[in-house]
Image (tube, rainbow, N blue to C red):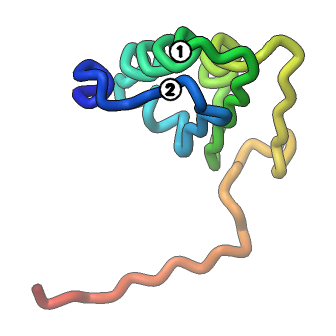
Amino acid sequence: MDHMHRGNFDFTALKFAILDEADQMLNLGFKENVEEIMATVKNGGLKELQCLMFSATVPRWVQQIAGTFLKPGHGSMDLVKDLKNKTSKTVQHLAINCPW
């Protein structure tokens, strides 16, 4: 945000805007920051900007907010469909004790 406010970035040639862990950014209170960045990017004179949002979990409220950033008719892909438990059952988690 600081670099953006100082004018250190030139968004005129930007083709893609990618938000990874979008649900976490929005959940942790960065909605206004994301909105400001996206507005600045879109107001940079771009005619065709592709916005991509990635997240392991996408609650309905995130889908609603994402709709404001994405083009009308945007698509979404839910790889685990309508399962209540969105956590993969094939992932094994390990804990390693670190003495430091």
Q: Give the SS element for disc 1.
A: loop
Tell me, yes or no, whether the two marked residues, 2 and 1, touch with CB atoms within 8 Å.
yes
Q: In the visual, does 50 lie left or right of 31?
A: right
- As shown in the figure, which amino acid type bears the numbered disc 1? Gly
Q: Residues within 10 Å of mark 2 (few under 14, many from 20)?
A: some
On screen, residue 69 above or below 9? above
Q: Residue at x 21, y 88 (%)?
A: 98
Q: Position of residue 36 (x, y in %)?
A: 42, 14
Instruction: Judge by depth and name the residue closer to the eye, 51 or 61.
Output: 51
- Badge 1 local density, few (<14 within 10 Å), some, or many (20+)? some
* Place of residue 92 in the rendered image (x, y in percent of width and height, measured from the top left): 60, 79
Q: Secondary structure at mark 2?
A: loop
User: Which residue is denoted by mark 2 in the rendering?
Assistant: 11
Nearest to N terminus: mark 2 or mark 1: 2
Q: Where the C terminus falls, by quadrant? A: bottom left
Q: Quadrant of the N terminus?
A: top left
Q: Amino acid at mark 2?
A: Phe
Residue at figure coordinates x 70%, y 50% from the top left: 86
Based on the displayed image, in which of its 4 quarters is residue 75 positioned? top right
Q: Is residue 13 above or below residue 48?
A: below
Please report the residue visible at 26 percent of the width from the left and 88 percent of the height from the top. 97
Q: How many marks overall? A: 2
Dividing the picture into quarters, in which one does residue 60 lie? top right
Disc 1 target residue: 44
